[in-house]
Amino acid sequence: MKIRPQYFGYTTLLLFLGSLLALAQSADSTTQKTAPGAGIVGILIAYWICNSRKRRPIGGWLLYYYMQLFGGALISFSWLFGMLENFNSELWDNPALYTLYLISTIPAYIVTLGEVTVGSMLLSHRFRNPQTVNWLRIVFVVSFVFGLIALLIDSAHWPESIAFDLLPVVGSILWFLYFTRSKRVQLVFKERNWDPNIIYPTKLA
């Protein structure tokens, strides 16, 4: 089964340890039964962490974005080292199929590196401006395009990997919309004038 790197980003927190165990031991029925429970725990932990920091600049959904971005990238590239043999052309009997495999996998890792780079730049006050936000939005568009390409290839040759393609495609759309319309993104990154009371007005006694 092919694993796209963004998959880990969108599930690292939502499914927590449960998703990783299910992927590593998909044939183990016991693991499959415990994964949903671990996933619920992961959701609650992620919600508590992000919600408890909602009045800080990097908090709420923005904090969740960075948690899934860095956590997912770390796990996905660690996973990649165990899959390097898949990129050995000598192990493929069909050169055309090998080329399709590269097209459906390598761009995802490149996009992930680009997203980590631009996302990290936004954490520096020096690069907090509308232009850098637009660069990140472009990365989401590129991720969406390559995700669709991978989806088409996998639907014809690796149908078991379709779910791994859908998550990045949907995630790219959602994060693009978030970084386009979010008031927090506007205040923190574009205007560099974060005031939590604008989003969370202080209740008067």
Image (cartoon, rainbow, N blue to C red):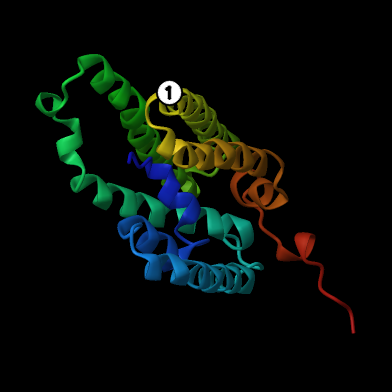
In the image, residue 155 sits, relative to residue 162, either above or below, namely above
Residue ID at (13%, 30%): 88
Picture coordinates of residue 178 (x, y %)? 65, 44
Q: Quadrant of the C terminus?
A: bottom right
Picture coordinates of residue 138 (x, y %)? 53, 29
**Residue on which disc 1 sits:** 156
Which residue is nearer to you in this view: 58 or 3?
A: 3
Farthest left residue in view: 90
Mark 1 crowdedness (10 Å alpha carbons): few <14, some 14-19, many ≥20: few
Q: Is residue 161 left or right of residue 94?
A: right
Residue type at numbered disc 1? Ala
Residue ID at (64%, 48%): 185
Picture coordinates of residue 87 (x, y %)? 19, 31
Farthest bottom residue in view: 205
Label 1: element kind? helix
Q: Note whether residue 124 is visible.
A: no
Q: Quadrant of the N terminus?
A: top left
Farthest right residue in view: 205
Which residue is nearer to you in this view: 189 or 181?
A: 181
Residue ID at (43%, 23%): 156
In the image, residue 149 sits, relative to residue 2, either above or below, namely above
In the image, residue 120 sits, relative to residue 158, either above or below, namely below
Q: Note whether residue 200 is visible.
A: yes
